[in-house]
Image: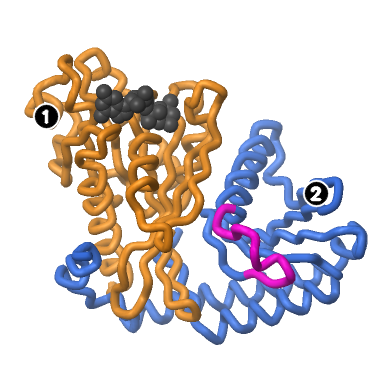
Chain colours: A blue, B orange
């Protein structure tokens, strides 16, 4: 298992953002959030920009971690799809791959069937992009190209000097 | 696992506060929240019981300064300290970049401290992490209490590896930021190591 950081470059981010924008339209969703299992928000799209997406990411990861734990207790590997129905808005949560979670918020302008269909396709594409990102990060690490490879004690001290 | 985003020029890291029940983990986060500039913090989320014991986790996102043009963000989590919440503790440790062990200085809590530290080591091991290699600091909390154990004794018992350690009185804030800075320093040094050619 690799414990190196997840590194995302601008071009990867743009690809992911474009995929999410398209999924918002295709699924008639209100908002889409891509979150990693450790609770970091990776990207978002849609009309919910005001929502506290940092909290959303951490709670989503907690939720997935808890249900994943439940799954294992009863002998399932994981529950790959979660659906929460609300008065107005609904949440559709899926695992894109082993590390990443896709959260779709939708209301009566869409439907569970449509969301499920569109998420399936977009999820597979996202998984491919993440696989490429992972490989790229490994190559970058092997070549020592990270800007953090040569941070100094002074850099770290300066961080705390304010 | 830290997340370096070149697009937003941010580094995100996850820090977990661990320790026995009632040692003051949540109090540490509450103090950091209270004393951090609103521009640099997000909302603090506490999933707690009616009696304010942590049920699943507390979460507080904060930003420190910039390093090499990247904004550093730390996601602070606490675990529930009560023994029977072990399943939840394991989940929260996933992807951790740095650990603060908060010990309760009261003599009658020494056994609980030791057990919790062993539990931490075990739970890290389950996900392939070695406490001796993870960025790690120890905080001796509740130094204000009359029944606090002598510092030397606590060090010998809880910090034989001599990682950076700090005395604290979390409900007044003493030692809280020193502890946070200590673990953040460890995490960034580790990031440097992980980013370097192997
Ligand atoms: N005297 C004293 N009390 C403290 C100190 N730090 C925390 N407390 C108190 O200890 C109690 C428990 O603190 P919490 O922060 O909730 O403990 P916790 O570690 O989060 O506990 P769990 O959520 O059950 O794991 C509270 O009443 C705090 O006010 C300290 O330094 N000195
Ligand atoms: Mg607590």
The residue drawn where x is 46% and y is 31% is B80
Secondary structure of the residue carrying tag 1 is: helix
**Label 2 within 8 A of ligand 2 by Cβ:** no
Residue A86: horizontal and vertical position, in percent? 83, 46
Residue A121: horizontal and vertical position, in percent? 80, 71
**Label 1 within 8 A of ligand 1 by Cβ:** no
Give the quadrant of the C terminus of chain B: bottom left
Secondary structure of the residue carrying tag 2 is: strand
In the figure, is residue B27 to the left or right of A73? left
Q: Quadrant of residue B69?
A: bottom left
Q: Quadrant of residue B17?
A: top left
Is A106 covered by the magenta stretch?
Answer: no
Give the quadrant of the N terminus of chain B: bottom left
Q: How many other residues sit within 10 Å of disc 2, few (<14), some (14-19) or many (≥20)?
A: few
The residue sitting at the bottom extreme is A11
The residue drawn where x is 29% and y is 79% is B68
Q: Which residues are magenta?
A: A44-55
Q: Which residue is tagged 2?
A: A83
Residue B163: horizontal and vertical position, in percent? 17, 45
Q: Report the disc number at residue B110.
A: none
Q: How many other residues sit within 10 Å of disc 1, few (<14), some (14-19) or many (≥20)?
A: few
Nearer to the camera, B96 or B10: B10
Q: Which residue is tagged 1?
A: B156
- Compared to B149, does A59 lie above or below? below
The residue drawn where x is 26% and y is 67% is B193
């Amino acid at each position: 298992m690799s414990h190196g950081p997840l590194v995302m470059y601008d071009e990867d981010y743009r690809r992911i953002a474009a995929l999410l924008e398209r999924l918002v339209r295709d699924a008639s969703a209100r908002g889409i959030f891509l979150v990693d299992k450790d609770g970091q928000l990776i990207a978002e799209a849609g009309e919910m920009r005001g929502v506290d997406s940092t909290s959303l990411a951490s709670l989503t990861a907690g939720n997935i971690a808890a249900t994943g734990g439940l799954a294992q207790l009863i002998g399932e590997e994981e529950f790959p799809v979660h659906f929460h129905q609300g008065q107005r808005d609904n949440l559709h949560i899926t695992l894109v791959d082993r590390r990443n979670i896709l959260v779709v918020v939708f209301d009566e302008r869409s439907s569970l069937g449509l969301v499920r269909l569109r998420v399936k396709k977009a999820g597979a594409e996202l998984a491919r992009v993440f696989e490429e990102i992972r490989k790229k990060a490994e190559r970058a690490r092997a070549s020592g190209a990270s800007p953090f490879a040569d941070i100094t004690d002074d850099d770290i001290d300066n961080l705390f000097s304010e | 696992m830290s997340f370096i985003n070149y697009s937003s020029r941010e580094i995100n890291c996850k820090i977990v506060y661990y320790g026995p029940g009632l040692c003051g983990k949540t109090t540490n986060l509450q103090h950091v929240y209270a004393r951090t500039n609103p521009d640099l913090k997000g909302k603090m989320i506490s999933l707690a019981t009616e009696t304010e014991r942590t049920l699943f986790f507390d979460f507080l996102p904060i930003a420190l300064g910039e390093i090499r043009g990247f904004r550093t963000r730390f996601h602070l989590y606490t675990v529930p300290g009560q023994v029977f919440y072990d399943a939840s503790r394991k989940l929260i440790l996933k992807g951790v970049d740095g650990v603060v062990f908060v010990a309760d200085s009261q003599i009658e809590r020494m056994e609980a401290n030791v057990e919790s530290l062993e539990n931490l080591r075990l739970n890290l091991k389950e996900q392939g992490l070695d406490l001796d290699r993870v960025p790690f600091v120890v905080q001796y909390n509740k130094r204000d209490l009359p029944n606090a154990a002598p510092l030397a004794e606590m060090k010998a018992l809880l910090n034989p590896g001599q990682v950076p350690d700090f005395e604290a009185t979390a409900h007044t804030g003493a030692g809280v930021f020193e502890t946070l800075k200590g673990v953040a320093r460890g995490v960034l040094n580790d990031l440097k190591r992980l980013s370097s050619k192997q």
